[in-house]
Image (cartoon, rainbow, N blue to C red):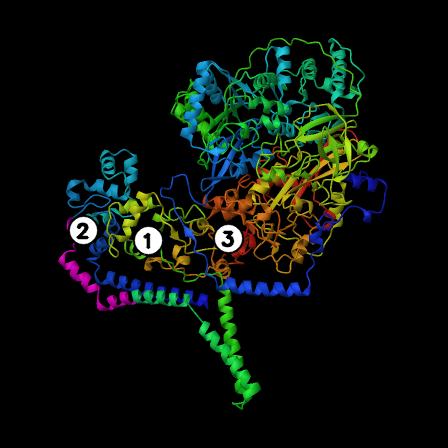
Amino acid sequence: MDKQYWQSLEDYRETKTKSDFSKKAEPEFSIEGLDESEIKAKSSRRDFLKMLGFSVSAVALVSSCQMPVRKAIPLLNQPEELTPGVANYFASTFFDGTDYCSILVKTRENRPIKIEGNDMSKLTKGGTSSRVQASVLNLYDDARLKGPMKSGNATDWETADKEVIEKLTVLADEGKKVVLLTSTIISPSTTALIEEFTLANPNVEWVMYDAMSMSAIRNANDLNFGRPVIPSYSFDKAKVIVGFNADYLGNWLMPVTFSKQYSSSRKISGKNPKMSRSYQFESLMSLTGSNADYRFGIKPSEEAIVLLNLYNKIAESTGMSVYNAPKSPVDVTDVATDLLKNKGKSLVVSGTNELNIQLIVNAINNALGNYGTTLNISLPVNLKQGNEKAMEALVKDMNAGKVDGILIQNVNPAYDYSNASDFKTGLAKVDTKVSFADTMDETAQLCDYVLPDHNYLESWNDAEPIRGSYSIMQPTIRPIFNTRQFQDTMLKWMGNDGDFSDYMENNWKTMLADSTNFESDWNNIKHDGVYHAKVESDELSNFSAQSLKARTSKNVDIELVPYEKIGMGIGKYSNNPWLQEMPDPITTTTWDNYLAISPAYADDNNLKLEDIVEVNGIEMPVLVQPGQPVGTASVAVGYGRTSAGKAGDGRGFNAFGFKFGESITINKIAGKTYPLAMTQMHHDMEERPIVRETTFDQFKKDPKSGNELHTYDEKHNVTLYNKIKYDGLHWGMSIDLTSCTGCANCVIACQAENNVPVIGKEQVKNRRIMHWMRIDRYYSKDEANPEVFHMPVMCQHCDNAPCENVCPVAATNHSTEGLNQMAYNRCIGTRYCMNNCPYKVRRFNWFEFVNNNNFDYNMNSELGKLVLNPDVTVRQRGVVEKCSMCVQRIQEGKLTAKMQDRELREGDIKMACEQSCPTDAITFGNLLDENSAIKEDQDNPRMYHLLESLHTLPSTSYLTRVRNNES
Amino acid sequence: MIINNFVRINALMIKGYIFSGLFSLLMLISMSSFAQTAQDEKNFQQCKACHNIDGAKLIGPNLKGISEKRDEAWLIKFIQNSQEMIQNGDELAVQVYNENNKIPMPSQNFTDEEVRGLLLYIEGGGVLPESEAVAQAAVDTEEQQANKLNVAADAELLLVKMKRDGMRNMSYVFIIMVILIVVSLFDLAVFHIVKARWIHYIIVLTAIVVISEIIFVDATSLGRQQYYQPDQPVWFSHKVHAGQNQIDCRYCHFTVDRSMSAGIPPVETCLNCHNQVKEGPITGTKEIEKIYASIENNKPIEWVKVYNLPDHVYFNHAQHVNVGKLDCAQCHGEVKEMDEIIQIPDLSMGWCIECHRTEDVQFATNKFYDQYKELHQKLKDGEISNVTVQNIGGDECAKCHY
């Protein structure tokens, strides 16, 4: 391999200077990073004797104790559909105001424990995102409000209703202005309800607000097509995709849907494989950029210039009007040629919320004839309806004392509005302030009444993310607390005693007016969770061209780019410890945000990782990010919550005050550092051929390209021992690295399925992260604009497993189905297996993570423990754990087949990571089944095993990464 | 030792079965002409749970004069499969169903002949004709009576023994042994009362052996609860329900063949019968009242769990009962003879594995096992004669621990 791969900058610079390998990096179990007390904590002979005495007396004490009496309490009436011990699945919808996903909720004994993707949705097609996976934990959040509150004190619903209705009536009678401030609402029934409410109360104005707005796209389409909409995008139909600061695989608009589409256009199969090509121009290292075939770093102020140059190049050859443009910092000739070659089969998108930029993007798509193929204006996306102008006006009006009442639903502008202090001063001037927040968030704290809404898993609702594509949300558990759904509250205030589920059903009756049997149709829709109506594409008005312009780029030191992290988003789930501890796919940092700067800037200004700098009065740690364009810095929003709950409060700093492209000065605060807990260097694979990749052109010439070592290893790895023979079942997994985008959905899915504990920032820093599945991130090429490589790694279930031979108590051994089993009750914690595992996938329970106040996360709370999967043991201190290949799912699938008296079928058993993968990168199955997809992958010329030269014979395999570029 | 106990229980039970089997055979031979009607009385036991011939209405209607009221062909059909008739919309069947609070009558596995016999028996008011009664009495000879008593006494004895074993308390023996060691060592070293040294050695060695045995047995049973028989909040007798009334285990533990948990029946299930049966033979109304109290107060009955497995063990009833076709009694013992449930096996891993090593899987009948091609080949070639759970990996860690 002539290509060098590296995981961190230090790593890169060491290898570049060809210094001695042994000096490099830190070992797996370094005491570096441990706190002083831990390093010094040596035990003496006396300690040993003390402990011995103590443990002997403890054993004596325990043995003299009675076994606890365990109760078996049946239900009074057992509903027919509930069988204790058997999981039920309900189709539902995840929508939190920003992200949409069609889901299945797995419930055990009527309590939701896991979210799965809904295969029947034509949008998300069974995929989810890490936030969707983690959302089940929000249901069991201790920070949730237990009932209605009045000025910070608990009250009851009757009193609250009476008082609020009284106040609203007075306001209505006097004709004073009341504002209903909500997040984007994509529910047709809720919209109907709110419209009914505003009709009955003409003094109420409805304003929708998004923390990260996309109104420029709507405005641009209004100018171009006369419709203020966001079109639906089809990344699967595009052969060339050009993105400008649009993280469509991570955060932009509908990342799950787009990931499904994107990966489907890049699946390499069949005799004539096809693959789309993606270009990404961006001002930070995003998930999409890290997966793009070509990536270009630009400053925010250069985006319009590059776009206009691109437009001009295309317009020249299509005979359209050309506009004056400053010289582009990037040569876009190749991109333009590629786009022109794929007219009608290409897509240009921009995530920048600037009208001018969106107009140029529209003009390019129009010139390429993409409307009607990869973009569809007549099937608009209903997400992101927030109106910036209306919000600005509201804040102004509030400050001017023109607003007398405000009802706030599902938004937290006191935290995430760009000018939060103005909002707060304005809010203080409003007489009647009612919030429907489910936790005491920053905005709810300032309100008189907080009437907590249900969690989405307790609610009825519907959704129409794209015109004609409907999705139903239904409750999967009875409300845990004394909360009430926002819509029910609305109905109550309107004097309607019914509940929202009836209202919704009535609404659907009118929507399905031509249905001959509404009852059965409605039941089917609720069962499937989705409904795809037949919609006719209506006639489009002609594209009305607007004049395009681009200002010369700013000549400033640093332009700042605020962005959303894959896990944290806009900070709504700040109190979710799973998401807090999820390593960011790019920086692998947990629990914090930071200022990401370019390596060149860091060198020039003598800054390094964990230094503290001051920007606009906010102190923040520095992270040197390879690929961060020169002249830019990026910072993640969603941190710095002050009123989120135990896990979220005081993590990082609030970056919502920064504007996109804002010029800043960075002042180093000398002598101060802040530790960042990164998993980056935990599992360095050193210089072995772990990462294998090729380009599409080379692949077409030789499918084995990039994977030549596999043949070599197959040939040279001979052994005297017999290969294990399997009869009937041999489980295997394969991961297509070409599809995998590194979105970390699988990490959280695995955590939810397998009761993986959260260990907190300190312990992550000590390299003790417990995730059974990690996503290794490698860089290659230069540090200014590296190529990025994501690789999920979990237990490889080796047939010749190094861990099994060294266990002194045979706690880990091999099954007749090819699984590397781990018996926790047998493990004595020598950690020999961890030491001997070449993949470093084994995890040791250094502490008791359950019922331990030092790890005050969900496993230390009676409520939080309800999310645990009852089929998986909660591990105790002192044992080793690792990926079990979801053996509980395998056993369940086998049992179902046995009970139905049939053989196992493909797809009967799906791994937690595989089920909801938004790119279908993971395949699991029986390697002995000749017709299975896994067998096909096994015979794929791209197939290789990790470190196959060690002859560990893993059951997990990888398919080489294919990039659609040159070099 | 523990397993021995279990084997002994089995042996005794088997003895009981053999005796009763022999005697029913004898009975059949000796009274072939009257067998029909004696069998009817036995068959009627199944009806008795819900029907009286004369007297108060139980769950189903009173059966007096039923043959006159209904057509015989209809009755036969209804008794064999009432639900089908209701579903097919038979008017009379639906009417009967509605009249009886919509509690469906379970299908009875009787032949037409048997139903006719039953109807004759009911017509006679539930009394055997004199000649048969005599014959029946003749069958219940002293020998059989004695045998019945023997079986019952055996079972009783067993339970007593189980309880005694469950409360094995060797602490006095342990202390005495320790004292013996101390005394003999002192004598050996200081007092020299007994001159022959080998006596000391023998005493010390024996005491050590006994102590080791006590420690070993007690330590292995740490955390185990063999012969555990807690007091339940309701004095519920399995002997009355499953034994005398012959109610199938699955009637109450109805999730046993589809879930990991056999299921403790909801109070609702008790009411299926006990909304009519308000008085029991042993405790009168005292215990049955608790059912009504539970419903009234909307509070479920908090049973004490008897069979407890550690958290790191996964056990699935459906796998064993539905797929493995095991009888409940194979693990739970003769529940039909127990008033309150007592834990028969020690639920040790050895006990599980023992069975996995010896018990056959449904290799030929369940299509799931078709994929084990090599094993099928071996069976065909006669290399192996049967396939045990162990042969398909049933003794591996991750089959139960995950």
Task: Tell whether A458 sits left or right of B162.
Answer: right
State which quarter of the image contains the N terminus of chain A.
Answer: top right
Of helix, strand and loop, which one carries label 3? Answer: loop
Give the quarter of the image for residue B161. bottom left
Give the letter of the chain under mark 1: B
Q: Which residues are magenta?
A: B121-150
Residue tagged 1: B234
Residue tagged 2: B121
Label whose residue precedes the other's in the sequence (3 or 1): 1
With respect to residue A372, does A484 lie above or below? below
Task: Verify whether residue A271 appears in magenta.
Answer: no
Q: CA distance from mark 1 to mark 2?
A: 36 Å
Callouts 1 and 2 close, C-beta under 8 Å:
no
Of helix, strand and loop, which one carries label 1? Answer: loop
Residue tagged 3: B311
Of the residues shown, which amino acid type is indicated by label 3? Asp
| For discs 1 and 2, the disc positioned in front in the rendered view | 1
Label whose residue precedes the other's in the sequence (1 or 2): 2
